[in-house]
Image: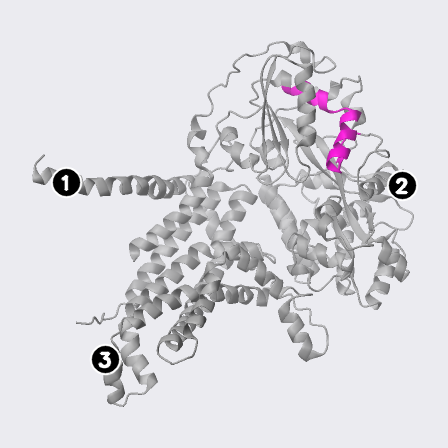
């Protein structure tokens, strides 16, 4: 075998298995999903009726899908702001401010990340429980009368009540990511800033943020993607989209339509919508977050 | 990053399509499915049951959940003894509905299916044309004891599409209102027998600082089954055909005067503050455990409740059951039944054996064994007094046998209308909508489903 052929064989040995897996487990399902979205299919019947774009036309007229999109982006915005703010704060506190027992806090803040989202949902259901939950018991102490607010049952509080556990569950991972980024900044830069008389705040904005921007960007995009595709779990565990569909997100509505109401074609159309919206959101964010990358020479 | 985003989307789609992966071959599933050894002996359908010498393969699919599989194993073993030449295959388990789904889609289903549990829906199977029309068979089927099967059923098979039967109810249960007999005795509260006494005792309970009524807000079909459906039948003069008409999606069936009366009863409970404020956000286990802790006096639920909460029942708690409260004084109580059914696949390879199995199963001895092995009621009029069935079930049996009780027909709504009904009911209980809006939503959903 010639050197050239060897090289090609070597490359192929790595690429082909991956490509096959990618095609079977990623590309095929995507196209299969898109294909199903053009059919009227219950998900269990032998027959599928081709109906063209009818599922998508129906989708536009469906008021619940608009609620779901609104809720999805509510969670996206809420989580990006909440998680990034707190994760950065904790990361700075643990690395830059001399706090005693910082490694202890690092572990504590990371714990929610190793708990399954299902467990988190169940735990927070107890926190929000109107008759026996922590929040209402706490409020009862101050109000003097029994507080019976159904946090997850009122349309004006339900989405906010889903946001806090989502933020709480997400901080740890991004905190670790940012800690690693901050620790890779040479301490000389901070020493020099100190000598120049820069305050901690000034150092944060002028040294830390530019040098960890790449990681922050990754964090934002990752939060956005996982929220658009994964908020299904927390919603399903805590409210199942209720009351009266007010906490439905696209993922939970997809599940509801596909597996509870037997409109698999319609559910696939929602899947395609998620794909499109995720794609658009990522592209837009890529543009918005573009900023000169500062690299250490 | 873009690629990564795409990957994440892809994973989601993967999850979606993996679930319907079997659909791939669904398009060519029209080819005829031949039995390996077709039994052409048609006489077996009319003979008493299990004629000796059934041959070929026979496959039965049954979900294993709260009722376990002891009864199934026992019955199938007996059936095997009666038909030594039949090769029986049991496809069973808690996930069996999902596991067998690809085979139903491909047109290669088992012969007999017990429809229960996660991933199963009787009405959808009928809509998808997967079940055999049993109307003629049920009209004449007899069991090995010589009883006509339809004569000994508690609940008759549900009529679909203008009187056709596709399923035979195997498990029978009832929705209703549950309370703690011990608590009521201790507090001196009277057990309600009609709407007026229900309101009176609720006022008393509320005065004592307890919520009169809690319900499973996340799953509003409990309050539909335990309170609203019986109220609609009661308001309809005890005529259960109102539910059948709704299941048949008849225009106007969701906005009749009886429906309005029933909904106004719920509004009355709501406006008097009898419904627990927190109930809207509770799921079944939350609300049931709060009820067990006496945070509320009544809960609309089904007969499985005692069995389900077995581990959490406090000492001294004594389950009480009332089928309905919405009726006027002196009128009959209304039983809203639920059933789990057994059916034969339209593409069954051995329909004769399947029919013989159904006839074989529906006997009084098997009903007693069912009660003993599962603690629930099989849909056969059998004497359970000596059996080891739970006390609530025996209490309920007394109602079913009483002539002061009307048993409504089992009516299964289309899944879209069912969801609309659940959403509307929950919205009604919290005051987001009024009865007019409830009726409008349901009429709209029914109209859409009719298309």
| A115 up-or-down from B256: above or below | below
Same-chain check, marks 1 and 3: yes
Tell me the subunit letter for badge 2: B
Residue B136 visible in this rendered orientation of the protein = no
Q: Residue furthest bottom?
A: A197
Name the residue beneath numbered marker 3. Answer: A188
Name the residue beneath numbered marker 1. Answer: A8
**Which numbered circle lies on residue B404?**
2
- The x, y position of residue A28, in whole percent, is 35, 40
Tell me the subunit letter for badge 1: A
Tell me the subunit letter for badge 3: A
Question: What's the CA distance linking mark 3 and mark 2?
Answer: 90 Å
Residue drawn 43% across the image and 29% down it: B25
| A138 up-or-down from B117: above or below | below
Residue drawn 38% across the image and 66% down it: A176
Nearer to the camera, B216 or A261: B216
Describe the element under mark 1 as helix, strand or loop.
helix
Range of magenta residues: B354-380
Q: What secondary structure characterizes most of the magenta part?
A: helix
CA neighbours of label 2 inside 10 A, class few (<14), some (14 to 19), many (20+):
few
Mark 1 vs mark 2: give the one in front: 1
Q: Is residue A85 left or right of residue A150?
A: left
**Which numbered circle lies on residue A34?**
none
Mark 3 vs mark 2: give the one in front: 3
């Amino acid at each position: 075998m010639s050197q050239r052929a060897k090289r090609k064989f070597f490359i192929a040995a790595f690429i082909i298995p991956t490509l096959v897996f990618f095609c079977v487990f990623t590309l095929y399902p995507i196209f299969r999903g898109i294909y199903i979205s053009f059919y009227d299919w219950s998900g269990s019947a032998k027959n599928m009726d081709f109906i063209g774009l009818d599922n998508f036309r129906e989708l536009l007229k469906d008021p619940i899908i608009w609620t779901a999109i609104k809720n999805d982006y509510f969670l996206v915005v809420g989580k990006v702001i909440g998680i990034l703010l707190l994760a950065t704060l904790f990361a700075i506190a643990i690395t830059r401010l001399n706090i005693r027992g910082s490694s202890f806090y690092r572990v504590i803040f990371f714990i929610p990340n190793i708990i399954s989202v299902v467990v988190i949902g169940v735990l927070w259901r107890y926190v929000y429980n109107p008759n026996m939950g922590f929040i209402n018991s706490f409020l009862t102490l101050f109000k003097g009368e029994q507080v019976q607010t159904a946090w997850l049952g009122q349309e004006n509080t339900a989405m906010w009540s889903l946001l806090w556990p989502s933020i709480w569950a997400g901080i740890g991972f991004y905190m670790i990511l940012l800690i690693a980024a901050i620790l890779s900044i040479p301490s000389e830069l901070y020493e020099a800033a100190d000598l120049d008389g820069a305050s901690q705040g000034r150092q944060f904005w002028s040294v830390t943020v530019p040098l960890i921007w790449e990681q922050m960007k990754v964090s934002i995009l990752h939060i956005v993607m996982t929220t658009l595709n994964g908020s299904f779990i927390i919603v399903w565990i805590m409210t199942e989209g209720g009351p009266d569909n007010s906490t439905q997100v696209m993922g939970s509505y997809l599940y509801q339509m596909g597996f509870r109401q037997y409109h698999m074609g319609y559910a696939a159309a929602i899947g395609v919508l998620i794909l499109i919206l995720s794609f658009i959101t990522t592209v837009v964010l890529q543009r918005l977050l573009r900023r000169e990358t500062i690299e250490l020479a | 990053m873009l690629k990564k985003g795409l990957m994440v989307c892809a994973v989601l789609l993967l999850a979606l399509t993996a679930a319907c992966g079997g659909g791939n071959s669904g398009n060519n599933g029209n080819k005829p499915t031949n039995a390996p050894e077709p039994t052409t002996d048609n006489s077996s359908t009319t003979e008493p049951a299990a004629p000796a010498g059934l041959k070929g393969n026979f496959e039965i699919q049954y979900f294993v959940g709260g009722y376990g599989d002891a009864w199934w194993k026992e019955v199938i073993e007996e059936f095997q003894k009666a038909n030594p030449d039949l090769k029986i295959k049991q496809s069973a388990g808690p996930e069996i509905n999902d596991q067998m789904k690809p085979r139903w889609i491909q047109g290669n289903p088992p012969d007999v299916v017990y429809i229960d549990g996660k991933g199963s829906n009787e009405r959808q199977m009928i809509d998808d044309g997967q079940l055999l029309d049993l109307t003629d068979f049920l009209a004449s089927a007899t069991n090995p004891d010589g009883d006509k099967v339809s004569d000994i059923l508690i609940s008759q098979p549900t009529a679909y599409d203008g009187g056709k039967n596709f399923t035979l109810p195997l498990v029978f249960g009832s929705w209703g209102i549950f309370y703690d007999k011990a608590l009521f005795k201790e507090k001196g509260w009277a057990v309600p027998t009609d709407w007026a006494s229900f309101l009176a005792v609720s006022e008393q309970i509320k005065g004592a600082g307890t919520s009169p009524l809690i319900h499973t807000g996340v799953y509003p079909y409990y309050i539909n089954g335990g309170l609203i459906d019986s109220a609609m039948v009661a308001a309809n003069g005890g005529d259960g055909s109102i539910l059948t008409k709704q299941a048949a999606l008849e225009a106007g069936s969701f906005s009749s005067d009886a429906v309005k009366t029933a909904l106004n009863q719920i509004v009355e409970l709501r406006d008097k503050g009898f419904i627990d404020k927190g109930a809207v956000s509770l799921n079944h286990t939350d609300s049931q455990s709060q009820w067990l802790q006496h945070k509320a006096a009544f809960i609309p639920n089904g007969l499985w409740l005692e069995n389900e909460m077995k581990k959490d029942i406090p000492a001294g708690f004594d389950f009480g059951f009332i089928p309905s409260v919405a009726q006027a004084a002196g009128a009959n109580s209304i039983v809203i039944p639920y059933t789990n059914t057994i059916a034969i696949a339209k593409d069954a390879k051995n329909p004769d054996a399947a029919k013989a199995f159904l006839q074989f199963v529906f006997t009084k001895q098997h009903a007693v064994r069912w009660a003993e092995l599962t603690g629930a009621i099989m849909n056969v009029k059998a004497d359970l007094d000596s059996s080891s069935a739970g006390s609530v079930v025996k209490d309920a049996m007394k109602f079913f046998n009483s002539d002061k009780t009307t048993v409504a027909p089992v009516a299964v709504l289309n899944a879209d209308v069912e969801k609309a009904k659940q959403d509307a009911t929950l919205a009604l209980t919290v005051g987001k909508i009024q009865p007019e809006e409830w009726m409008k939503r349901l009429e709209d959903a029914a109209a859409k489903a009719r298309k």
